[in-house]
Image (spheres, rainbow, N blue to C red):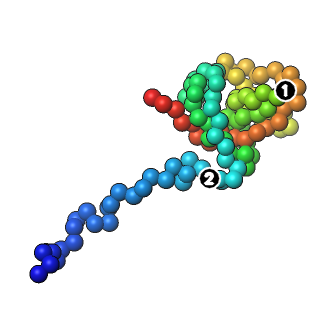
């Protein structure tokens, strides 16, 4: 006798599966980058200093998205708005960020990770 009762465990099929953060956080691995926030300028959006931003370079930004862009050699994260051909970047106070040079869009923020 093997010691088995002949009945399967009621928990069979519900075993804990490994958590795959890549599947949870990344939709396009070759185009995804992680960046660390340096300021609290977007605290109202849940982004505090040292937050990790998951940025997807393959996504086309839509109005209301948080985006990372490069201006004068510096990276910035702001809300993006577009009306027709006019593109605007909005700060925490709801004001348009004045442009100081050429802006190159880096990608769209898809997730934010931070310590509690």
Q: Which mark is residue 27?
A: 2
Nearest to viewer (mark 1 / mark 2): 1
- Whether 82 is drawn above or below 91: the answer is below
Q: Which residue, as the protein is rendered here, is positioned at the far bottom?
A: 1
Viewed as shown, does residue 15 lie left or right of 81?
left
Residue 4: where, in percent of width, then height? 15, 75
State which quarter of the image contains the C terminus. Answer: top left
Q: Looking at the image, which residue is at 67% across and 43% down?
A: 33
Q: Which residue, as the protein is rendered here, is positioned at the far front?
A: 2
Q: Are marks 1 and 2 in contact (CB under 8 Å)?
A: no
Q: Looking at the image, which residue is at 11% across and 81% down?
A: 1
Viewed as shown, does residue 84 lie left or right of 19?
right
Query: Callout 1: helix, strand or loop?
Result: loop
Using the rendered image of the protein, determine whether residue 64 is visible from the camera's viewpoint. Answer: no
Q: Distance between the residues labelled 1 and 2?
A: 30 Å
- Whether 91 is drawn above or below 16: the answer is above
Using the rendered image of the protein, determine whether residue 61 is visible from the camera's viewpoint. Answer: yes
Q: Which mark is residue 72?
A: 1
Q: Looking at the image, which residue is at 65% across and 53% down?
A: 29
Residue 89: where, in percent of width, then height? 75, 28
Query: Which badge, 1 or 2, is on the more N-terminal residue?
Result: 2
- Closest to the observer, 54 or 90: 54
User: Hey, which quadrant is residue 69 in on the image?
Assistant: top right
């Amino acid at each position: 006798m093997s010691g088995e009762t002949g009945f399967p465990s009621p928990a069979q099929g519900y075993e804990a599966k490994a958590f795959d953060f890549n599947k949870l956080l990344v939709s396009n691995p070759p185009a995804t980058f992680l960046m660390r926030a340096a300021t609290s300028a977007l605290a109202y959006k849940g982004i505090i200093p040292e937050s990790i931003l998951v940025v997807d370079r393959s996504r086309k930004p839509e109005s209301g998205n948080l985006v990372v862009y490069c201006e004068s050699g510096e990276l910035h994260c702001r809300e993006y708005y577009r009306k027709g051909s006019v593109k605007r970047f909005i700060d925490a106070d709801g004001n348009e960020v004045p442009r100081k040079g050429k802006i190159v869009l880096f990608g769209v923020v898809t997730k934010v990770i931070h310590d509690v």
